[in-house]
Image (cartoon, rainbow, N blue to C red):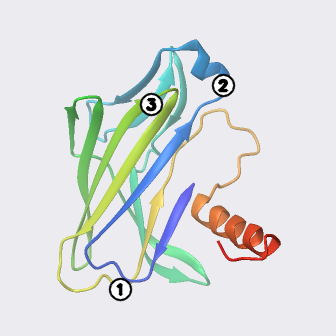
Amino acid sequence: MLRARVHALTAAAAASLLLALPAAAQMSGGLALSVSDSAPRRVSVSVGERTFFHSPPDGLWSVATDWAEGWPSGWVHASPASVERDGDWTIVSGEIALPGGALRVRDAYRLEAGLVRGVRRWTWTRKEILPRATLSVRWVVPGAINAKPMMPGVASRHARAVLGRHAGREL
């Protein structure tokens, strides 16, 4: 799970994510990205009959609107309202209704050499600042055993700090 903590969301934020599959799945070919036709729409990535990951049942997009005891709270979820294709990109879009306005969300996905590239854009529709928001990227991995949350933003920041100290310079 990837979460980006944003104290004040004013206009737009974008995130890019590469979703990797096990090597056996990449070599077997037949990697497919699909979006269900019925509401709530679900995005999934599969090879043949095996689904490697899919969007959560409560919605592809999630945003926490508050913090409680040091953790995000007041979660609001939504699923895509529309799907379109532009070349090799699959684009899903919709909005999350929040107090004081709507948060528009647009994801674009494309298959790239055994990986799925995902680009998410969040756009706050009001001029007033959204005082608290935790933007979340979540995927369900069927059959995962001992799965732990993965937070690349935190992990990479920590890695840069540690590597920078060991190299005698800040990265």
Name which residue lies at 64% across and 55% down: 150
- x, y percentage for residue 165? 78, 75
Q: Tell me: 84 left or right of 66.
A: left
Q: Is residue 49 above or below residue 67?
A: above
As helix, strand or loop, the secondary structure at mark 1 comes to loop
C-alpha span from label 3 to label 2? 14 Å
Q: Give the amino acid at mark 3.
A: Glu
Dot 2, crowdedness within 10 Å: few (<14), some or many (≥20)? few
Identify the amino acid type marked 1.
Answer: Pro
Q: Which mark is residue 131?
A: 1
Q: Is residue 101 above or below residue 104?
A: below
Residue position marked by numbered label 2 in the rendering? 23
Residue on which the image places disc 3: 112
The amino acid marked with disc number 2 is: Ala
Image quarter where the C terminus lies is: bottom right
Q: Report the side of 165 relative to 144 (left or right).
A: right
**CB atoms at circles 2 and 1 under 8 Å apart?**
no
